[in-house]
């Protein structure tokens, strides 16, 4: 018998599936996530666990869980699970991404309508015996402009409903193609600031990543229309809560509807909830019978089928490849992943349309489709964070209208093996090529038209410059002054002669301050300065479990 812990509230239909399965023993403890030590102990006796957002599967909770083999998240967000810790433990993590899309989109629309028609306070006034019609005059939605930040499953469903309400729908998502946006009647912006100034209402539907945390901040709020209304039914922190409070206090922000918060526990959001023009709900986006039934059935199926049939579904951290084949391909997977990360970071939120990969030489004997998936997961992970893995990256790109193609030739060029990737954005093409030396050493050998030999790990400062005497010394002096150590430097010249355009790639031991970068940017012979953050050399590949 396999034992399955359910550590959050789960719809009875999902519990029934687990209970009635002949090979499963159900351990239903919906409150256990509130006591970390009890949760750890219960997991010691579980082969699988079904969770919702209440259960935090941190590194501390997962480390040493020898029996646990599968985690099923009945819902979308896996930000409450330490995926690296799970992968390290060899635990498969799956989610049920589609089950609550419509309910969360409907919650967003309900919140928008409630906010614009003062439904909450007006209802409360009648409960208190008042009849005050004038105080609760609202705002009509038809004809208003809404900005949807993040056009994935929920963002697109919200946009569709807003079109139905005769609103003007603007959207921002670097990972959606113009064509897909057109089909959905969304006016797509590639610059979030250009979108925000036009909106009466802004709703966010991105995951919480380093890039989206505080994407709506004080500076951006200040530039929005006076009276703008904000909605967050995605993740707490995407709208900076302190900036929002200040905007509400000054009256610049006309109101907010919030379902999610940085801290989700009783009393933690009293300040926000105290504003009369703020509508708050306690993370109810997915809380409908329909959504809960769907995610519960899917999560129960995932756990049962994995434990009893070895079937893997909707995994976010699992790769379909044998251990032996994987080991022989590791360096190429790592190289492609890093090229994807590098290109994503040098494209600065431009609309990504696709990429072309070319494989040359020895790499052609390896599973190139998988290596392409590794590239794609690097490319998308800048926006989608931990939810994208080598398993789901191809489908994720396709869903967003991003076309990744690959060609190969066994002929060798300057190197015995090479992967070249060209990113196509709505503004330009950017090419990066890399090779492997030995089994583990990864090198960037081409960046656009420049040939070079740079390390592909850690913090990279890349800049173009005029190839003139004294420049390297000047940059070295700048970083020396700001106490930034340069561990390696590679140069490439457009034509192999002095005086022309050149590129430099510096590996830095520590992050330069803004002042140090500004000094580099301000140097008259330097242009196009970029900071790229890559994993350390030989870092584990979290999405491979290596
Ligand atoms: N309130 C709730 O109960 C509830 C329920 C379900 C989902 N959610 C949350 O809603 C959010 C969206 O879920 P989904 O299923 O639509 O996810 P999704 O992965 O389908 O869509 C997310 C979209 O955000 C885009 N994105 C990423 N970074 C961006 C950036 N910097 N700027 C603009 N766009 C960016 C991605 O390209 C993607 O299209 C997630 O945070 C999820 O956890 C909340
Ligand atoms: O990520 C999700 O699916 C939502 O935040 C819903 O979370 P819940 O299932 O815990 O309500």
Image (tube, rainbow, N blue to C red):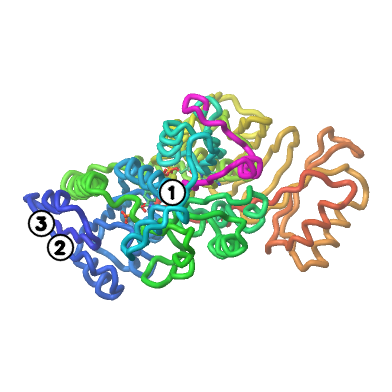
Nearer-N-terminus badge (1/2)? 2
Can you identify the residue that label 1 sits on? 117
Query: Which range is magenta?
Result: 182-205
Up the image or down, 355 lies above or below 434; here it is above
Depth check, front residue: 195 or 235: 195
What residue is rendered at 89% in x and 46% in y? 525
Dot 1: element: loop
What residue is rendered at 32% in x and 52% in y? 93
Q: Is mark 2 within 8 Å of ligand 2?
A: no
What residue is rendered at 37% in x and 55% in y? 87
Q: Is residue 199 magenta?
A: yes
Question: Which numbered mark, 1 or 2, is in the foreground of this view?
Answer: 1
Mark pair 1, 2: CA separation: 45 Å
Q: Are marks 1 and 3 in contact (CB under 8 Å)?
A: no
Can you identify the residue that label 2 sits on? 27
- Give the percent coordinates (x, y) of residue 294: 23, 44
Q: Is residue 538 visible?
A: no
Q: Are marks 2 and 3 in contact (CB under 8 Å)?
A: no
Mark pair 2, 3: CA separation: 12 Å
In the rendered structure, the answer to whether residue 388 lies left or right of residue 35 reads right
Dot 2: element: strand
Up the image or down, 223 lies above or below 98; here it is below
- Give the percent coordinates (x, y) of residue 228: 57, 49
**Crowd around label 1: few <14 · some 14–19 · many ≥20 (10 Å):** some
Q: Is residue 379 magenta?
A: no
Quarter of the figure with the N terminus: bottom left
Q: Is residue 115 visible?
A: yes
Can you identify the residue that label 3 sits on? 1
């Amino acid at each position: 018998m396999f034992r399955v812990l359910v550590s959050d509230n789960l719809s009875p239909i999902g519990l029934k599936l687990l209970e009635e399965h002949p090979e499963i023993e159900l351990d239903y403890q919906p409150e256990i996530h509130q006591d970390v030590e009890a949760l750890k102990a219960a997991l010691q006796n579980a082969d699988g666990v079904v969770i919702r957002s209440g259960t935090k599967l941190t590194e501390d909770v997962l480390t040493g869980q020898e029996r646990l083999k599968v985690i099923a998240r009945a819902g979308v967000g896996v930000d409450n699970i330490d995926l690296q810790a799970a992968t390290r433990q060899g635990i498969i993590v799956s989610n049920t991404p589609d089950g609550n899309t419509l309910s969360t989109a409907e919650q967003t629309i309900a919140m928008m309508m409630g906010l614009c028609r003062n439904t909450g306070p007006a209802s409360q006034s009648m409960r208190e015996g008042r009849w005050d019609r004038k105080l609760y005059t609202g705002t009509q939605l038809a004809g208003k402009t809404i900005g949807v930040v993040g056009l994935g499953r929920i963002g697109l469903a919200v946009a569709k409903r807003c079109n139905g309400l005769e609103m003007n729908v603007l959207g921002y998502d670097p990972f959606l193609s113009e064509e897909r946006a057109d089909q959905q009647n969304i006016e797509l912006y590639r610059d979030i600031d250009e979108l925000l100034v036009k909106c009466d209402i802004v709703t966010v539907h991105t995951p919480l990543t380093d890039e989206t945390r505080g994407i709506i901040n004080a500076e951006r709020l200040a530039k929005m229309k006076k009276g703008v209304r904000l909605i967050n039914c995605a993740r707490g922190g995407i709208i900076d809560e302190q900036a929002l409070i200040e905007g509400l206090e000054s009256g610049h922000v006309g109101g907010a509807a919030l379902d999610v918060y940085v801290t989700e526990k009783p009393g933690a959001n009293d300040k926000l909830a105290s504003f009369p023009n703020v509508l708050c709900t306690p993370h109810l986006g997915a809380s409908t019978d329909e959504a809960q039934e769907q995610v519960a059935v899917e999560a129960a199926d995932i756990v049962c089928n994995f434990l009893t049939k070895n079937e893997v579904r909707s995994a976010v951290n699992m790769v379909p490849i044998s251990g032996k084949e994987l080991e022989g391909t590791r360096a190429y997977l790592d190289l492609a992943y890093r090229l994807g990360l590098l290109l994503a970071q040098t494209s600065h939120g431009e609309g990504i349309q696709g990429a072309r990969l070319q494989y040359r030489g020895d790499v052609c004997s390896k599973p190139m489709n998988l290596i392409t998936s590794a590239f794609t997961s690097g490319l998308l992970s800048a926006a989608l964070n931990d939810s994208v893995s080598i398993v789901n990256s191809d489908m994720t790109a396709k869903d967003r209208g991003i076309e990744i193609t690959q060609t190969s030739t066994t002929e060798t060029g300057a190197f015995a093996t090479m992967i070249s990737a060209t990113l196509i954005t709505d503004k330009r093409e950017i090419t990066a090529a890399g090779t492997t030396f030995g089994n583990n050493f990864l090198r960037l050998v081409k960046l656009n038209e420049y040939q070079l030999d740079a390390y592909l790990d850690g913090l990279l400062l890349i800049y173009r410059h005029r190839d003139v005497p004294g420049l390297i010394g000047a940059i070295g002096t700048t970083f020396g002054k700001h106490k930034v150590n340069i561990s390696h430097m590679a140069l490439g010249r457009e034509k192999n002669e002095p005086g022309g355009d050149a590129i430099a790639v510096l590996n830095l031991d520590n992050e330069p301050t803004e002042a140090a970068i500004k000094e580099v940017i301000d140097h008259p012979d330097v242009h196009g300065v970029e900071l790229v953050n890559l994993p350390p050399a030989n870092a584990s590949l979290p999405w491979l479990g290596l």
